[in-house]
Image: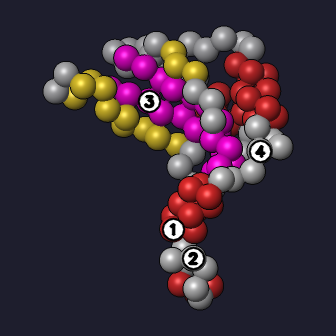
Amino acid sequence: MSRHSYSGRDGIPRVDIGWDRPLGTFFVQVFHVDDGEEVAFLWEGTDYGQIPDAASAVKIAAQYADLPPSLTATLEIDRLRTSAQADGPAQSAAKRWRFYDPKDGNNGR
């Protein structure tokens, strides 16, 4: 997993963007301040394969922060660096729990 943080615009304190290998998706989190704490009000890339390419994630994040021109390439490199990794026992169990579908029968839950 990778995570890159940037200062937001228009009162947004932080925008995070990165690659989540176990979910096979890029993600974007946009935060605001609520009662003195940063809270994500937008979080895309929480479902398996939801944002399959870096350019799509950058397009979402660019609505909230000024991003470096090299970010798309950086995120793709992050993805490629993890392409040979496999899920460990905890990640496999979490996926079975998270993506359980009763129509599939007993698939680990």
User: Residue shown at 37%/17% (left/top)?
Assistant: 13
Whole-Å distance between the Cαs marked 3 and 2? 33 Å
Q: Give, as a single range, the part of the protein colored magenta.
A: 13-32
**Residue 13 versus residue 21 in the image, above or below:** above
> In this orientation, which residue lies closer to the viewer: 62 or 35?
35
Q: Which residue is mark 4?
A: 85
What amino acid is labelled 2 in the image? Gly
Sequence-earlier tag: 3 or 2: 3
Numbered disc 4: secondary structure: loop
Q: Which residue is mark 3?
A: 30
Whole-Å distance between the Cαs marked 1 and 2? 7 Å
Q: Which residue is mark 1?
A: 97
- Judge left or right: residue 36 versus residue 32: left
> In this orientation, which residue lies closer to the viewer: 106 or 38?
106
Instruction: Residue 5: give x, y in percent of width and height.
Output: 52, 19
User: Residue shown at 54%/34% (left/top)?
Assistant: 28
Q: Quadrant of residue 51?
A: top right
**Residue 74 versus residue 93 in the image, above or below:** above
Of marks 3 and 2, the one in the foreground: 2
Q: Does the residue at mark 3 contact the one at mark 1 (Cβ under 8 Å)?
A: no
What amino acid is labelled 4 in the image? Gln
Numbered disc 2: secondary structure: loop
What amino acid is labelled 3 in the image? Val
Quadrant (top left, top right, bottom left, bottom right) of the N terminus: top right
Q: Quadrant of residue 2?
A: top right
> In this orientation, which residue lies closer to the viewer: 23 or 28?
23
Of marks 1 and 4, the one in the foreground: 4
Of marks 3 and 1, the one in the foreground: 1
